[in-house]
Image (cartoon, rainbow, N blue to C red):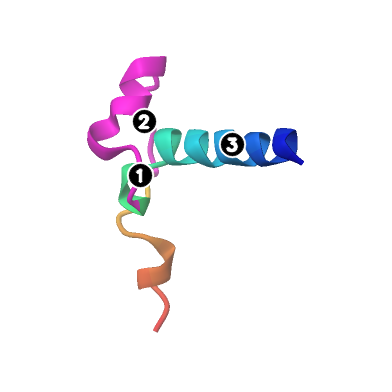
């Protein structure tokens, strides 16, 4: 239904807006700055997919 589609789109948008920038979203940590989030350690140095061979 339309409501279910809307919920999925909003949740994916939030995930991209608030994720760690190492994974390709939240460029410049804009989402984190908007909500006042201060990243803590440990943080990933690179995406998980690049660790796998």
> Residue reaching furthest bottom?
53
Q: Is residue 7 above or below residue 48?
A: above
Percent x, y for residue 37?
40, 21
Residue under label 3: 11
Percent x, y for residue 50?
35, 71
Q: Is residue 22 above or below residue 14?
A: below
With 47 as the anchor, is 12 left or right in this view? right
Q: Residues within 10 Å of mark 3 (few under 14, many from 20)?
A: few
The tag on residue 39 is 2
Q: Residue at x 42, y 77 (%)?
A: 52
Q: Quadrant of residue 32?
A: top left
The mark lying in front, picked from 2 and 3, is: 3
Q: Residue at x 36, y 26 (%)?
A: 31
Quadrant of the image containing the C terminus: bottom left
- Tell me the CA gap for discs 2 and 3: 21 Å
In terms of secondary structure, where does tag 2 sit? loop
Was residue 27 drawn as part of the magenta stretch in this picture?
yes
> Residue reaching furthest left?
28
In terms of secondary structure, where does tag 1 sit? loop
Was residue 38 drawn as part of the magenta stretch in this picture?
yes
Percent x, y for residue 26?
33, 37
The mark lying in front, picked from 3 and 1, is: 3
Q: Residue at x 71, y 37 (%)?
A: 2
In the rendered structure, are the residues bearing label 3 and label 1 in contact, judged by CB atoms less than 8 Å apart? Answer: no
Q: Is residue 23 above or below residue 33?
A: below
Residue under label 1: 25
Q: State the extent of the magenta-drawn residues as a range.
A: 24-42
Q: Residue at x 29, y 27 (%)?
A: 30
Quadrant of the image containing the N terminus: top right
Sequence-wise, which precedes: disc 2 or disc 3? 3
């Amino acid at each position: 239904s339309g409501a279910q589609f809307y919920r999925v789109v909003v949740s994916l948008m939030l995930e991209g807006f608030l994720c760690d920038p190492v994974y390709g979203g939240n460029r410049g940590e804009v989402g984190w700055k908007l909500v006042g989030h201060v990243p803590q350690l440990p943080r990933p140095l690179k995406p998980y997919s690049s660790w796998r061979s």
